[in-house]
Amino acid sequence: MLFPDAGSHLNALEQAFYFVTLFATESVVVFFVLSGLLVGGAVLRALDEERFNPSQYAIDRASRLYVALIPAVVLTLVLQRVGATVDCTKGDTIGTIGANLAYLQNFSFKPLCNNVSLWSLSSEAYCYLLCPLFLIAVFRRSGAAVLWAAVALVPALLVFQFVRSTPLFGLGLWFCGLLPWFFRVRLNAFIAVLPLMVSLVLGRFHLFPNELVEECCIAPSFALFLCSDVQMLRAPLARFGSYLASFSYSLYLIQMPVAQAFGWIYGWQRLKNGVLTSYLVYAGALATMLVLASIFGLAFESRTGQLRRLLSKPQRKLQPQAS
């Protein structure tokens, strides 16, 4: 939004700046693997302990998604309304807004014009629907789950494309995140991480023939790292990492409209490379984005547990009481 697109005119230091700040697509792949590890792992544990409750699972997932999504969409539309965007020639329609709230961005609908990052949320929500059905079908040998999974696949297959913005994006990546629940590799974590590092670097240099090959290299290599002896790692900034994780979803939801607002304030790609003030503006914008996401997370994302308990009360009332 702030700097010109990278080109051959950049010197070594400028190229390094672009290199370390443009891991966007690679990060999406890593995110989907982590989602499979955490959300899929919770489903696996519940199935193994015979306590999986579809209704509670739906409440948990919906509350997690909507508690911050709705206010983020409101913020996005407000920035549209005041014109603080660089990609919106006109505001989004009611249909587009509704499709984004229903996670239909990749089903022949578009993300909000100043929040295009929401394309991946459509695939994430779709994984939340499909993956438990697949797991129930396999581990409970449920014919009904197989049928429902097949039915749920039909709409995605009808609009399938070999691009990232397709409903089935992330499905295989999500299942890669389940591998550490089944396999352990006796490998030093510092060695196991090397294939991941190589894959990320190759991706940044655009050395993969296409997006699918890139994803098929990054996701399994990250899963290999997660299957290794990761407990040997001791993070000196673990508390800070946990703090960042507490509003990571909020950061994902608001980073693009906020970035577009900065692009509108300073001008589209107006900052000059090699000028100290340009990098100070970038650092200030990045810090502001993190602070806003932290406040947003405290106001909304941190309320996830409260919303879950509120939504779970009617369900508990309907359960038969013990005699």
Image (tube, grey):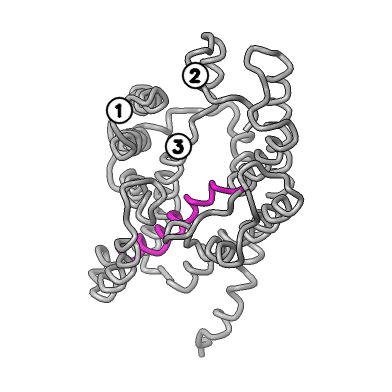
Quadrant where the N terminus lies?
A: top right
Compared with residue 221, is residue 44 higher up or lower down, i.e. above or below? Answer: below
Q: Residue at x 56, y 63 (%)?
A: 101
Which residue is label 3 attached to? 25
- The answer for how far apart the CA atoms under marks 1 and 2 are is 39 Å
Lower position in the chain sequence, tag 3 or tag 2: 2
Q: Residue at x 40, y 60 (%)?
A: 43
Query: Residue 115, percent across and down?
Result: 59, 48
Q: Are marks 3 and 2 in contact (CB under 8 Å)?
A: no
Query: Residue 93, percent across and down?
Result: 60, 63
**Image quadrant in which you'd find residue 257:** top right
Is residue 268 shown in magenta? Answer: no
Q: Which residues are magenta?
A: 114-134
Main SS, magenta residues: helix
Mark 3 or 2: in front is: 2
Mark 1 or 2: in front is: 2
User: Considering the numbered disc 2 on the image, is that residue within a helix, a strand or a loop?
Assistant: loop
Lower position in the chain sequence, tag 1 or tag 2: 2
Q: Amino acid at mark 1?
A: Leu
Which residue is label 2 attached to? 7
Is residue 124 shown in magenta? Answer: yes
Q: Residues within 10 Å of mark 2 (few under 14, many from 20)?
A: few
Mark 1 or 3: in front is: 3
User: Considering the numbered disc 1 on the image, is that residue within a helix, a strand or a loop?
Assistant: loop
User: Considering the numbered disc 3 on the image, is that residue within a helix, a strand or a loop?
Assistant: helix
Q: Residues within 10 Å of mark 1 (few under 14, many from 20)?
A: some
Of residues 277 and 139, the one nearer the viewer is 277
Query: Residue 122, percent across and down?
Result: 47, 56
- Left or right: 298, with 92 as reference point: right
